[in-house]
Amino acid sequence: MPITGYSKPNGILMKSIPKHIISLLPALLLLWGCSKSISDRSQAFPALNPAKTDLNAGTWKPILLNAPDEFAVPAPGAPAGPDYTAQINEIKSSQASMDSREHEALQYWSAGAVLRWNEITRELVAKYNLPPVNNPDGTYPVPDANNPLAYPYFPFSNPPYAARAYAYISAACYDALVACYHYKKLYNRAAPYNVSNTVTALVPKTDLPSYPSEDATVAGVMWEMMKLLFPGEQAFVQEKVNEHLQARIASGANVRSDLDAGFALGRSVALKFVARARTDRAGQAGGSAAIEAQFRQDAIARGEAPWLSQEFPARPGMLMLFGRVRTWNFDSTTLISIRPPAPPSTSSQQFKNELAEVYEYARNPTREQIRIAQFWADGVGTYTPPGHWNAIACEDFVQRNFSEVRWARNLALLNTAMMDGAIACWDAKYFYFNPRPFQMDNRIKTVVGLPNFPSYTSGHSTFSGAAATVLGFILKDKAESYQAMAREASISRLYGAIHYRSDCEQGLICGQRVGGFAIERGKTDGAGE
């Protein structure tokens, strides 16, 4: 059953909000409600029925694992004898006593583990995508991972944070499923619906071995990764894990020992990704007032007008050191080499022309331009631009009947590229520290919010260039369609009066280059195309 109820902060969180912030919540919730809402697509997805099982996926190249058997999975018991019979009886008992809620859960999870956990991640990103309100003294509080239920809630899942969350979850699921499929082929224990004619298959039957369970492997990954990424949601995640695993029992696809082995494997692999995340420098990405002052002084020294926060009171720039976070598909030297060229000087005629162009779009937008700007806005309370591209990818992948492991591989390529794109974009933003259009001309009114970080380059453009490039590699028949979407997402920021044309054009180019590095990984991972 799809998760719902994320349109407002829940009661537990409300108790910890300071009074001066509670007074501002109606305005915040209005802002949230006016942003592009998350569509509930869960009911439209059919049960996963892979065109290919990808049984040889245990030979694919993982991202962090040294080898698919790095974490041992013990041999299963034979599908005979009293212990296995007891596990078969658990399935039959579960099927015989299912109520309507359990039937709903079975239908929901049968669409696919990777798909559903990606959806849940997007919902949580949207729930936590709210910037903290200022304190009475004009300062801004910082979310604390060690106290996630106190205001301001941890995390503030802005676009770079969201890109990182999607990347870690997708990459960890991929590596865990490579390991899972290695053991599936090694032990080759048939699914219970293929072992016992007394078990009814309530999901499409395949010849894929059931031990360890691919669904439980993904659930094990999510249990560990969510503790890191959304620590205040452990009770909710536990509920979804339990629901997921019970649905697999009821489906006839797995016995309990399949689930136990898969869940333990997924947790072990996830902890390797957690260790990487704790050392990828994201925890230091917030920066400081002194660092921001230095960026400003550097821009002035170059003869440029520096970016200034347009919020009142002035808010520190968002994640000013995110450009130093560890990338997935290339190294720090490469990051510098693909940094976009300098934007037009703020004293140049080209800059004045581009600023005038923004003003014209803000002054006299067409209905179509407003529609495009709002469709791609992905602002406060949404699952962010990377989440938007995940939704696009998932809807298309459903039509291709991919196996769970191929789902994971494809989303890992997509999301590591978008996290790398976030790093490349934020590197450029704070290296050049370019002012926003509305800072340079206060006649400009935006229709999609007020981003609190430098202008050059466009994050939407970079995310979209990377996503479209990777998705075009995965689904070659849709490559041009994805590129057209990316161009529209990019130009939407000019239509919304958020960015100059050069921000959009160079962001798109940088994103395409970043996506190319993910494609190189995909060409050599052994999964084929």
Image: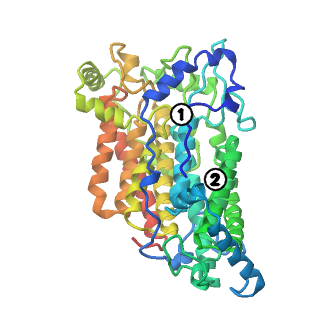
Counting from the top left corner in percent of width and height, residue 298 is at 51, 25
Q: In the displayed structure, would residue 476 be above or below residue 226?
A: below
In this orientation, which residue lies closer to the viewer: 98 or 375? 98
Location of mark 1 (residue): 7
Callout 1 secondary element: loop
Observer-nearest of 217 and 258: 258
Where residue 101 sits, quadrant-wise, is: bottom right
Q: Amino acid at mark 2?
A: Lys
User: Which quadrant of the rendered structure holds the C terminus?
Assistant: bottom left
Q: CA distance from mark 1 to mark 2?
A: 19 Å
Q: Which residue is mark 2?
A: 240
Task: From this view, report whether residue 460 is shown above or below residue 22.
Answer: below
Amino acid at pointer 1 = Ser
Between residue 370 and residue 486, name the one nearer to us.
370
Circle 2 SS class: helix
Residue at 34% over, 46% down = 509
Of labels 1 and 2, earlier in sequence is 1
**In the displayed structure image, the side of residue 289 where residue 402 appears, left or right:** left
Along the horizontal axis of the image, is 149 left or right of 23?
Answer: right
